[in-house]
Image (cartoon, rainbow, N blue to C red):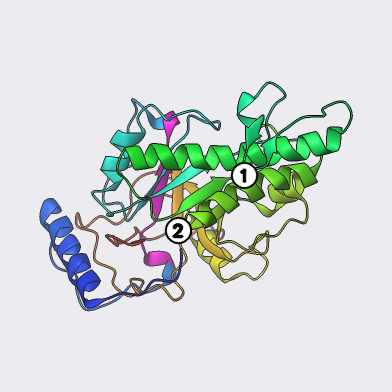
């Protein structure tokens, strides 16, 4: 997901985490053979308000990304903390994703902010909307960060969820202003931030705006397809490089961490339960059954 420097203390912590994870499942130690291929490594999952009161992904799970909103900015996922604590069984600081959109005319959160107080709606509508867009984007980022701080959690990455399903202006220039403002907030606080979405949706929403952030892209077909996107020079968008790929599997949004350069990518462990594949497993584009994934505890930290 990002460049990581691993110290001796970190490696010791990871080793402890792996031992604990194996003990919890009564598992045997990993053998000396690493994963045969990139596709043999375990994916993670992302969950949010749609999973409240429902089943969450079964173990073993490598990592999780938790939605902090209830589908829209300035709302709260009602079971966020429970889901985040669940994810912390795998990582110290799981990542979160943040819903982002353009402010509708009645959004009071856009009226004032770091850009100032937005006036001259009739005399200078372009200036007015430019002001509102920045205030709104900056404010929605600030709101989730302050809420997380109040819960005493520090996400490893803040992923901005940019999708056409949310409300946006017809002008990508103004939409980009919202996104730019949210990015500015996280950068000011020196917090890792990335973009979730697809190149197609990004083009509709933000046009040529290219902040050059890490990319979490969606829409891959199966685990093999996800792994291929990590290696594709055309899979990224917004001037960024793909770090994680989402696909649908196990009845959940499943995610594959691009392993290139990741210091933990060479430490897979065997499936603690010795399974060869659950029902409903995705298949490769060729139609071949994919192997069951191996667990990688603490992957993204």
Secondary structure at numbered mark 2:
strand
Above or below 120: residue 252: below
Q: Is residue 89 above or below residue 77?
A: below
Image quarter hosting the C terminus: bottom left
Q: Residue at x 33, y 71 (%)?
A: 264
In the foreground, 288 or 179: 179
Residue with the mark numbered 2: 256
Q: Locate residue 257: give its quadrant.
A: bottom left
Look at the image and say whether residue 48 sits in the magenta stretch. Answer: yes
C-alpha span from label 1 to label 2: 19 Å
Taking the spot 65% from the left edge, 71% from the top edge, the residue there is 233
Left or right for 45, reference 139? left
Q: Which residue is mark 1?
A: 162
Q: Is residue 261 visible?
A: yes
State the SS at label 1.
loop
Q: Outermost residue, right direction?
A: 123
Counting labels gives: 2
| Chain-order first, disc 1 or disc 2 | 1
Q: Is residue 219 visible?
A: no
The magenta stretch spans which residues? 39-50
Q: Is residue 68 left or right of residue 10?
A: right
Picture coordinates of residue 14 (x, y %)? 22, 66
Task: Verify whether residue 295 appears in magenta.
Answer: no
Q: Tag on residue 265?
A: none
Name the spot of residue 226 as percent of width and height, x first: 52, 60
Residue nearer the viewer, 235 or 127: 127
- How packed mark 1 is, by other alpha carbons closer than 10 Å (few <14, some 14-19, many 20 or more), is many
At which x and y percent is residue 148?
Answer: 38, 41
Q: In which image quadrant can residue 296 be found? A: bottom left
Mark 2 burial class by Cα count in 10 Å: few <14, some 14-19, many 20+: many
């Amino acid at each position: 997901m990002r460049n990581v420097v691993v110290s001796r203390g970190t490696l010791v912590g990871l080793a402890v985490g792996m031992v604990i994870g194996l003990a919890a499942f009564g598992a045997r130690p990993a053998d000396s053979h690493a994963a045969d291929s990139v596709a043999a490594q375990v994916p993670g999952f992302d969950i949010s308000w749609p999973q409240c009161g429902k089943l969450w992904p079964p173990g073993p799970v490598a990592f999780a990304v938790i939605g902090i909103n209830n589908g829209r900015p300035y709302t709260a996922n009602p079971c966020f903390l429970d889901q985040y604590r669940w994810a912390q069984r795998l990582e110290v600081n799981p990542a979160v994703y943040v819903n982002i959109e353009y402010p509708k005319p009645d959004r009071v959160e856009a009226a004032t902010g770091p850009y100032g107080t937005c006036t001259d709606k009739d005399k200078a509508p372009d200036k007015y909307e430019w002001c509102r867009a920045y205030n709104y984007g900056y404010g929605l980022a600030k709101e989730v960060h302050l809420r997380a701080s109040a819960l005493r959690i520090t996400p490893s990455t803040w992923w901005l969820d940019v999708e056409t399903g949310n409300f946006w202006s017809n002008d990508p220039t103004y939409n980009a202003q919202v996104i730019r403002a949210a990015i500015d907030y996280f950068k000011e606080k020196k917090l890792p931030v990335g973009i979730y979405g697809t190149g197609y949706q990004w083009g509709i929403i933000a046009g040529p705006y290219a902040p050059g952030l890490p990319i979490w892209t969606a829409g891959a077909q199966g685990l093999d397809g996800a792994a291929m996107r990590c290696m594709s020079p055309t899979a990224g968008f917004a001037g960024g490089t793909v770090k994680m790929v989402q696909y649908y599997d196990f009845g959940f949004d499943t995610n594959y961490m691009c392993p290139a350069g990741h210091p933990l990518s060479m430490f897979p462990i065997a499936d603690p339960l010795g399974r060869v594949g659950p029902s409903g497993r995705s298949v490769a584009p060729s139609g071949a059954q994919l192997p069951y994934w191996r667990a990688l505890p603490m992957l993204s930290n």
